[in-house]
């Protein structure tokens, strides 16, 4: 009868072969079932009835096995995605799922993360020059204090992504909605933005001199204390956008504001009033 119990458990556990914690559960369960079977036989119950009652005594074991397997696989994935301090230049991560992946202090130059789900991952202090993040999900990712020169973010999902203090020379953002993204203390003079929507983005203390945001949309964006000399918002839409200069409006800040191009743009009344009070050139601006 021990063989029959083993055969029964094998059939139940087959879908989870190779999962260590499930294998351990199977061994413990077999021992318990054998003990239960012996107790029933000692009570004078026949083989078939004792086997049936033994199997029935464990209830809905399949749900328990599934939960144990899922937990084990989740823990295995967490170990698998710890690449801190690794040399992974030109690696292929296209399409992978690596939630809360750890890529800190790693060499990732030229790596392909296109289409990957990297939710909650951290790349802090890594070399990610030329990496491809096209269509990648970078929700809640930390991409701060690292080199992202020439990295690509076409149609990426950027929600609460942190780019603060990173190098973005030559980085390209196209057809992206940046939601609650942090780009403070960053040099964006040589980055490219095309067809983007900036929703709640923080550009505080960032150098945007000469940047072209023509035709793009800004909602609840903060340009507080940012360098904005010769920035163009031609044809852009601005709603509830902040341009706070700091503690005081200096002559230097007034001169900088006057270099910003707003012609052809549309903006809400509050943003318009704020810029007008700073002396911005607002000819051909539509107030919405």
Image (cartoon, rainbow, N blue to C red):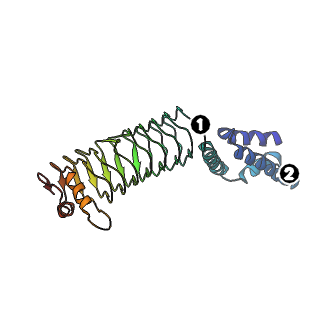
Categorize mark 2 by other alpha carbons within 10 Å: few (<14), some (14-19), many (20+).
some
Q: Position of residue 25 (x, y in %)?
A: 73, 48
Classify mark 1: helix, strand or loop.
Answer: loop
Quarter of the image containing the N terminus?
top right
The part of the image, by quadrant, that contains residue 241 is bottom left
The numbered dot on residue 38 is 2
The numbered dot on residue 169 is none
Q: Nearer the viewer, mark 1 or mark 2?
A: 1
Q: Position of residue 276 (x, y in %)?
A: 17, 61
- Residue 42 visible within the image: yes
- In the rendered image, the residue lying farthest to the right is 42
Residue in the picture at 15% in, 48% down? 264
Q: How many marks?
A: 2
Q: Earlier in the sequence, mark 1 or mark 2?
A: 2
Residue in the picture at 31% in, 57% down? 223
Categorize mark 1 by other alpha carbons within 10 Å: few (<14), some (14-19), many (20+).
some
Which residue is denoted by mark 1 in the rendering? 87
Tags 1 and 2 touching, CB below 8 Å: no
Per the model, the C-alpha gap separating discs 1 and 2 is: 57 Å
- Residue 49 visible within the image: no
State the residue in front, 128 or 52.
128
Classify mark 2: helix, strand or loop.
Answer: helix
Does residue 271 sit above or below 117 in this rendering?
below
State the residue in front, 263 or 25.
263
User: In the image, is 193 to the left or to the right of 88?
Assistant: left
User: In the image, is 267 to the left or to the right of 2?
Assistant: left
State the residue in front, 251 or 194.
251
Does residue 155 sit above or below 261 in this rendering?
above
Residue in the picture at 82% in, 50% down? 37
Q: Position of residue 7 (x, y in %)?
A: 75, 38
């Amino acid at each position: 009868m021990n063989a029959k119990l083993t055969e029964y458990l094998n059939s139940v556990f087959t879908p989870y072969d190779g999962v260590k914690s499930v294998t351990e559960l199977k061994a413990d369960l077999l021992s318990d079932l054998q003990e239960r079977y012996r107790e029933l036989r000692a009570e004078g119950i026949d083989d078939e009835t004792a086997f049936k009652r033994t199997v029935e005594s464990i209830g809905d074991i399949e749900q328990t096995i599934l939960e144990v397997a899922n937990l084990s696989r989740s823990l295995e994935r967490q170990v698998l995605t710890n690449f801190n301090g690794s040399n992974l230049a030109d690696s292929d991560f296209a399409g992978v799922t690596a939630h809360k992946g750890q890529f800190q202090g790693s060499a990732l130059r030229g790596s392909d993360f296109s289409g990957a789900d990297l939710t909650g991952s951290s790349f802090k202090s890594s070399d990610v020059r030329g990496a491809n993040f096209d269509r990648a999900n970078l929700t809640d990712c930390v991409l701060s204090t690292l080199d992202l020169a020439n990295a690509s973010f076409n149609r990426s999902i950027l929600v609460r992504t942190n780019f603060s203090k990173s190098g973005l020379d030559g980085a390209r953002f196209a057809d992206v909605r940046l939601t609650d993204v942090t780009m403070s203390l960053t040099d964006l003079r040589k980055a490219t933005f095309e067809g983007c929507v900036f929703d709640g983005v923080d550009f505080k203390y960032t150098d945007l001199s000469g940047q072209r945001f023509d035709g793009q949309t800004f909602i609840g964006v903060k340009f507080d204390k940012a360098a904005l000399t010769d920035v163009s918002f031609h044809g852009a839409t601005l709603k509830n956008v902040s341009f706070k200069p700091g503690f005081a409006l200096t002559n230097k800040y007034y001169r900088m504001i006057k270099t910003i191009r707003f012609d052809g743009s549309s903006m809400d009344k509050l943003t318009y009033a704020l810029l007008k009070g700073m002396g911005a050139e607002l000819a051909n601006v539509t107030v919405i």
